[in-house]
Image (tube, rainbow, N blue to C red):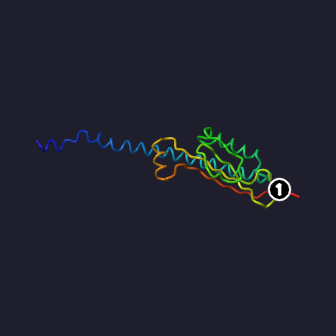
Amino acid sequence: MFRRINNDSRGQVFIEALFVIPLLFMIFCFIVEMGYLMYNWSVVNYYVCNTAEVSATKGQFTSEVRVGLAGKLADWTVSGQEYNYDVSGTSAPGALDNSTVYIYGTDMNTPVQRGTYINVNINYPWHFKIFLIDSMMRYLASDEQMRLKVNASAQSEVFLE
């Protein structure tokens, strides 16, 4: 009788699946979230570098260029429509709002002489879409606000007399 009970393996697959399926689901969610993060990182990098080049050809990091960068980020990033955009600064703000993208760099009212660098910087907040992944990453990073920070510099191409 004990031999019959010992050889009975009905339900073993079900018990193993109870352990494996949630783990596979979490791995799948993590892969999707990392895809979103990599996509946002590449979009933000591309547009910051592109904006630095545009500013270099104009010789100034103007307010129109800054607003254009904010519009591109709002259109092309995963959650760009949800954020506010602050384009007025020349340096990173002291207190960061978790729902604001900060675009800052070389003073927008000052033309830059040829050969001098124009700086374009972004401080972009990042939130994971899935609550469990968001909570886990905030715990692992031990940071309340996760942000993408991108800096680009280009030499001005405009000669000022």
Q: Which residue is drawn at 79% across and 61% down?
A: 115
Q: Front-most of 139 and 75?
A: 139
Q: How crowded is mark 1: few (under 14 residues within 10 Å), some or many (20 or more)?
A: some
Quadrant of the image occupied by residue 118: bottom right
Quadrant (top left, top right, bottom left, bottom right) of the C terminus: bottom right
- The residue at 49%/45% (across/down) is 134
Amino acid carrying mark 1 in the image: Val
Is residue 92 or residue 125 the one in the foreground? Answer: 92
| Residue 59 percent across, percent down from the top left | 80, 53
Q: Is residue 31 above or below residue 154?
A: above
Seen from this angle, which residue lies furthest left?
A: 1
Q: Is residue 17 left or right of residue 40?
A: left
Q: Position of residue 75 (x, y in %)?
A: 65, 39
Residue with the most extreme right position = 161
Q: In this view, does 100 lie to the left or right of 4?
A: right
Q: Whole-percent x and y of residue 147?
A: 58, 50
137 left or right of 110?
Answer: left
At a point 10% along the width and 41% down the height, the residue shown is 1
Residue wearing tag 1:
158
Helix or strand or loop: what does disc 1 sit on?
loop
State the residue lying farthest toward the bottom. 115
Q: Is residue 93 left or right of residue 139?
A: right
Count of numbered marks: 1
